[in-house]
Image (tube, grey):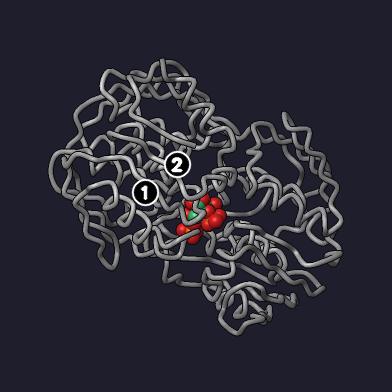
Amino acid sequence: MQITKTNALHGTVRVPGDKSISHRAIMFGAISHGLTEVTGFLQGADCLSTISCFQKMGIEIRNEKKKVMIYGKGLHGLSAPSSILDAGNSGTTTRLISGILAGQSFESIITGDASIQKRPMGRIFTPLSLMGAAFFSHHNNNCAPFTITGGSLKGIHYDSPVASAQVKSSILLAGLYADGKTSVTEPYLSRNHTELMLKGFGADITSENTTAVICPEPKLTGQKIQVPGDISSAAYFIAAGLMIPGSEILIENAGINPTRNGILTAAKRMGADISYLNQRTVSGEPVADLLITSCSLKAAEISGDLIPALIDEIPVIAVMAAFADGTTVIKDAQELKVKESDRIAAVTENLKAMGADVTPTDDGMIIRGGKPLCGTKINTYMDHRIAMAFAVAGMAAEGTTTFSDASCIDISYPEFFKDMASLVR
Ligand SMILES: O=C(O)C1=C[C@@H](OP(=O)(O)O)[C@@H](O)[C@H](O)C1
Ligand SMILES: C=C(OP(=O)(O)O)C(=O)O
């Protein structure tokens, strides 16, 4: 794959289904009674890992691409896995499944790829152990592979040190199996798809400010779920549409849940005027079509409670900042170091290689925008967000951009290059 500077982008694009919501639809369907039908499911490698894990635990899942059918067996219907559960590259799979496995009467082993084997799992071992599950990290490093011994769980209150929807969701799912109320408070509100969707399946779940509360409910019921387009995937089109002069693109069916739409807030702070058309609610999630028109971008500060709402979009926001006028400061984003790659290191290394003036910090980066950027060979670190963010950088830079390996894009957006190319006239 080679990318050169592109002309203005025009046309309409429909991004694939939301990754976070697709994972949850499979998981919640598996532990509910009866059929769950999912349309708009993301056929990315991460979500396929979730499907395969539940199939290994005896759940029939038919993936007909346009529709995924999950024949749920209820909270206690999973069987001991036929072999080690492989979460692939997916942190969401690993951490959310652990919450469910914590409440099972069997033992299971979870592993994943080289990246997953480096990501911190102590953050779920601690609360789930307090609830009564036991964990054994095979390399004694609080990472995968690990064994979970489920058990009878007790309800707890947990003050999470990190604003992480994966930690929150893992605890709430274990809470379905506990003997009483379970609650989680986080420092800032993270994405709330679990709270919204579990309620739809019949769970007794409420939230107020940064606290979510769940009470055990013996029976969840299968649902029809329509997955909205992924705002994290839309982010690459938003950035390209804003940065490439003369562009006008319509992104249809994008999820705009306020706990996820920080990219829109950041873009607005940077001077963009994005129109929200056809606003509606789909399966409990707010959705809109987004009209993006190119503009000259200016620097902004990205920090505090905005961070969880745009955590996965920071690589592409950093690219926008490199093309913007002024100094952008991104802080409070130390979580970037424990994603599929160390995204502070990966973004700053690649931006520097393209000629940008950028300084990494402990919890983010400082980008002095406006220097001319030139294509180079991007080291993706096999991180899908890095590959797509720098594909966008390559579309706005002089010269040619190539990649060490861009196959990682299949994790969240297998059709990315095709969809982007459809907008180039
Ligand atoms: O719950 C989820 O679906 C996700 C939560 C976020 O991770 P953290 O919970 O680690 O912040 C995000 O980065 C990830 O892509 C998906
Ligand atoms: C961090 C991400 O996903 P996960 O944690 O599920 O691997 C991501 O998609 O950017």
Residue position for label 1: 315
- The Cα atoms of the two marked residues, 2 and 1, are separated by 9 Å
Say which amino acid is labelled 1. Pro
In the image, what residue occupies the spot 30% across and 21% down? 293
Rendered view: 37 above or below 131 = above
Residue 153: image location, x then y, percent: 69, 75
Counting other residues with Cα less than 10 Å from the Cα at mark 1, is it few (<14), some (14-19), or many (20 or more)? many
Rendered view: 339 above or below 243 = below
From this viewpoint, which residue is outermost toward the left? 326
Residue position for label 2: 388
Quarter of the figure with residue 136: bottom right
Check contact, mark 2 vs mark 1: CB within 8 A.
Answer: yes
Say which amino acid is labelled 2. Met
**Disc 2 element:** helix
Using the rendered image of the protein, determine whether residue 7 is visible from the camera's viewpoint: yes
- Which of pointers 2 and 1 lies earlier in the amino acid sequence? 1
Residue 11: image location, x then y, percent: 43, 15
Horizontal arrangement in the rendering, residue 83 relative to residue 342 (left or right): right
- Give the position of the C terminus as an image quadrant: top left
In the image, what residue occupies the spot 31% across and 26% down? 274
Which of 348/95 is in front? 348
Tell me, for residue 267, which label it has, or none.
Answer: none
In the image, what residue occupies the spot 67% across and 75% down? 146
